[in-house]
Amino acid sequence: MVNEKTLINFELTKTPTPLPMSVFNQSRKNVIRLIFSIAFIIILIRLVHLQIFSGKYRQLAQENAILRKIIHPSRGIIFDRKGKAILDNTTMYDLMVTPSLVKGADTFSLCRILGIDTIEFKERIITAIIKNTRNRPSVFSPLLPPDKYAKISENLYKFQPGFFLQERQVRLYPYAAAANILGYLGEVDSAFLKSHAEDGYQLGDYTGMTGLERTYEKVLMGERGVQYILKDNLNRPKGPYENGAFDTAAIAGKHLYSAIDISLQELGEKLMANKVGAIVAIDPKTGGILAMVSAPTYNPNLLTGSERRNHFNELYRDPALPLLNRAVNAYYSPGSTFKTLVGLIGLHEGVISPGTTVTCSGGYYGCGRKMGCHAVGTFSLREAISHSCNAYFATVFRRTIDNNQFPTIDSAMNNWAKYMNSFGMGRRLGVDIPYEKRGLIPTANYYNDPKIFGKNGWNSCTIVSLAIGQGEVNATLIQLANAIAIIANKGFYYTPHIIDSIQGGDAFGLLDPYRQKQYAVKIPDEVYEVVHDGMQQVMESGTAAASKVPGIIVCGKTGTVENSYKGVKQKDHAFFAAFAPRENPKIAIAVMCENAGFGASSAAPIASLMIEQYLKDSIEGPERKALKERVENLNLIPPRIYKEMINQDSLGIDSELEVKENKETQNNKNRSKPSQKTKPEVLLPNNKKKTELIKDSTNN
Amino acid sequence: MNVKKTGIPRGFDTTLIWLYILLLVIGWIAIFSVEYRPNENVMKAILGLKKNYSKQLLFAGFCAFVGIFILLTDSKFFTATSNIMYLIGILLMLFTFVIGKNISGSRSWISLGHNFNLQPAELCKIFTALALAKYLSRSETDFTKTRFQFIAFAITLAPAFISILQNETGLALVYFAFFIAMYREGLPSWYLVLGFSLIILVISTLLVEKNMLAIILSAIAIVIIYLLRTRYKRYRSLTITVIGIWAVAVAIQRFAVPYVFDSVMKPYQVKRIYTAIGKDFIPKNAIELKELQEKEKGKQKDKGDYNVKQSKIAIGSGGFMGKGFLKGLQTQGDFVPAQHTDFIFTAWAESFGFWGSTLLIGLYFLLLMRIVKIAERQRSTFSRVYAYSVASIIFFHVMINICMTVGLAPVIGIPLPLLSYGGSSLLTFTTLIFILLRLDADRQMVLR
């Protein structure tokens, strides 16, 4: 440039008469060409960067234009043993809104149908805009109840195009029974998403929270489909991407075939009305659970519709704990029903023989302190069972523990505990209901703990109450039913389970544990026959003579369990365990009624009616029908629960529950607040706390 | 030399005509791809004149008519009437203040009825080019003299000034293109150097921290003085000049630029400039924020950074081979605002990728080089100045427009020559090029 300038100056000074300018500036055409070229090269370099080396724009373009939509398959159906659907799907409708199209809709009548005011209406619209922008539909009112659905679909023309109805699959419990077995669905939370990162869940998805819904979630959920949808700049869907070439179809969840007999289940729930307790009925041949009742129960359909949250809170706050599955998730002292096992282990260890007799004079004085007894006389094993003789089993238990075949009391104790474990006591059986409790069979270590007795601080006398199923021993009702099944089978069992088979095969091996035959201690069949004799006598002339089943030989054992609640002694729990028929047993059953007094008065008739229903398919004869009616109307709800109900009502809302309720609300509204705790709300009753609540602590 | 082998009479430059037609076709294809949706009846749409691509066809037809008309006109007509046309152009622009129609915030349009609008500022480019050519080709004009230079500036910048008043900053900027033509005619280099330096200074003011830049400028000044210390004895004034330039630069950086950005320019304009240099614009006070929001509310699609982001996504997603004709997802999903007008390049770049964009840019480059070649073979100053004006205008449009779409320049609403949808723009460039063809055909004559 400087050169040119000097050139111009030079030219100008040299020639006084100006020539045409172009002569002097001709070289500038090259400068201009250079400027043009440089500018184009800059653009070209930029294009190389944008179009060839920046992959991020391609990705951004995909995000811009393609919507990845998850297609939810319908969940699998659960059938009972006779092929009746006990957990089904039904279609409900969500009222959807596209905020940008609301103008002109008859909002007044919509508000009136839904029972909301205009402020609420506006709030919901704003929430929808925040959630999904104004051009994309969001849920305005989820899961409309039938009456509202009818009114809205009738008047839909008034609200279109801003509002429309969208189908949604919802769980349906056709029999409104077996709530605690089947379980319910709940929306996933962030903690769940984190722990199931590989399974493709998204915020807003539902998953099984309890019961079979949870255990078999993998099978029931099916496989989610993916649809790629083209969208435009306002996020409006425009149609499938590449005509659906990349889409994958949703695969429906697999059906489950359960061992449940729904009519038996229904009867059980009816019989347990107005009682607190549980029933477990098992098919001893297969380990299939025929019925599992936990009372009080609830209508599971309450937890599916739009009112789910309210119902849930109500159930959660109920002091009778309807959400707790008392058959699996709570444990009790098993009481006299436990005695048969003590007897069997004694026989196996050779400390007694079936002919061994013990004389009882109305109590057991072997340990210097009287242990009360129901019967007086001299008993062999058979009579001891039928009369539930405490003295007999205390003797057997002490002989087992003080057995001098073992070098120390510790090893004898541990040996006893091992046999108990082989009967399924004191360990998780592995039923297909989540959060099974293990119960407790104390070992030497347990007692050696300085907090209990300490080393050498105990002997067979200090722990003699174990012999009659009291003291430290704890069992779940399913363990008890399983033990009865073992006795019925004369030594073997299959792990109790609800699901027998899965449609299309068991791809995840979920049912493998239930196919293996398992054995308890090896005891000759003749010994079992003696025990069966004793149990048969219970039904014929013993403690449960009033609960005979006409035409069927039932073997049973009553139990009456002392217990206290918060240190206050409560009315005894009633237990009854039985199997029938004696030859070729088809049902093993355990019944427990909390604070119901004698086992023979409530638990035994319930078991008897259940056995009749299962074996004969109905309750026949006026006498039996009357019994059924009487049991149904029997109110055995402990007074303390009524008291708590009243307290709760007068106190208003428990603050802790309030917090949980809010949490639920937040989850459902899909808004996450930073302060929100991330602990999953899986099984809602806080297990430990709740079981303690009803746990019976007895130390005579 | 003026007898062409192709047989087109009177020696018109066929290369230029072919380039013109090619670009026009590319433009129409791009507009079509923006608007076309699957299952659309194209013939019906074209005949119905409902769609932009059908209107653009009509404009092209009209332009062909105008082009032929121009080619049939005597060259002397342009030299003779250039001053009068310039006056008419200015008057038309002023006229818009009275009967102007407001289209997207700018009162620079005159309605011709039937949804056809004319933007006089567009047409005024032609008249200005002719007027400048006329002025510089006068025998009494001595372009080495400052007085004549300033009159030339006034001729070119008057329409720019009116455009700014009409809120069409983009159009006003184009008038600075004439400086390239003037440079060719002997405008001292330092005008351009000064202009470039000023731009660099302003950009660095925005990018570099205030005190840091002052230190850098001072350091540069000291280094220059140190290097020139031997010459110092001969040119006393040199040091003073350097110090003077330093003082002005610092003053601009510290006071002038902040003043202009804070008080003179509208917040949305500042935001666009910030977007182009990759800086976040944070409104300083509530008034600015409100102004910005109002601007963005009125023209919802006019958010500078949104436009540029979407435009870059569309271009970038084309990749090397492009998505294919009518297969651009960004184009089909209306993601790029104003895609058929100012952002038409994105539609082409997404569909045909890097090779397509390179082809298009190459065509523009050939066009410019051809015009420069034509300019240099003119005997008369009038034709040469005019040819350079045409080259400069096209160059400015192409540069600013494409740089805007790839995120190198602020979003300034000026069309891509011959590609963007719009009658006014197409007519302007057609007229510019066909007058050049007409003048070139008579290049042996000395026109004044």
Image (cartoon, grey):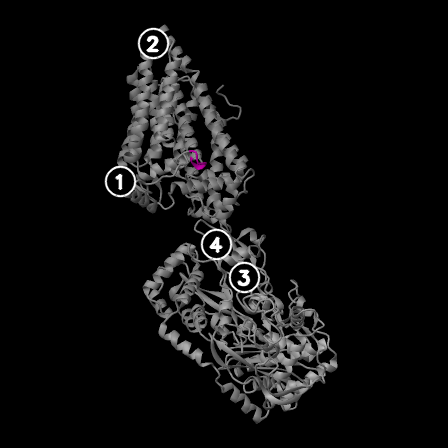
The nearer-to-camera label among 2 and 3 is: 2
Q: Amino acid at mark 2?
A: Tyr
Q: Chain of mark 3?
A: A
**CB contact under 8 Å: marks 2 and 3:** no
Q: Amino acid at mark 3?
A: His
Badge number at residue B99: 1
Where does the image place residue A569, in percent across and percent down from the top left?
Answer: 48, 79
Q: How many numbered marks are there?
A: 4
Circle 2 crowding by C-alpha within 10 Å: few under 14, some 14–19, many from 20: few
Answer with the quarter of the image where residue A581 lies.
Answer: bottom right
Q: Earlier in the sequence, mark 4 or mark 3?
A: 3
Q: Are marks 1 and 4 on the same chain?
A: no
For mark 2, give the secondary structure. Answer: loop
By secondary structure, the bulk of the magenta-drawn segment is best described as loop
Task: Answer with left or right where residue A199 lies relative to residue B333.
Answer: right
Q: Chain of mark 4?
A: A
For mark 3, give the secondary structure. Answer: loop
User: Is B425 above or below relative to A407?
Assistant: above
Q: Which residue is mark 3?
A: A72
Q: Are marks 2 and 4 on the same chain?
A: no
Q: Which residue is mark 2?
A: B235
Q: Chain of mark 2?
A: B
Circle 1 crowding by C-alpha within 10 Å: few under 14, some 14–19, many from 20: few
Compute the Cα span from label 2 to label 4: 73 Å
Identify the image quadrant of the C terminus of chain A. Answer: bottom right
Compute the Cα span from label 1 to label 4: 43 Å
Q: Is residue B406 in the magenta section?
A: yes
Q: Are marks 4 and 3 on the same chain?
A: yes
Magenta stretch, residue numbers:
B404-408
Circle 4 crowding by C-alpha within 10 Å: few under 14, some 14–19, many from 20: some
Outermost residue toward the bottom in this view: A622
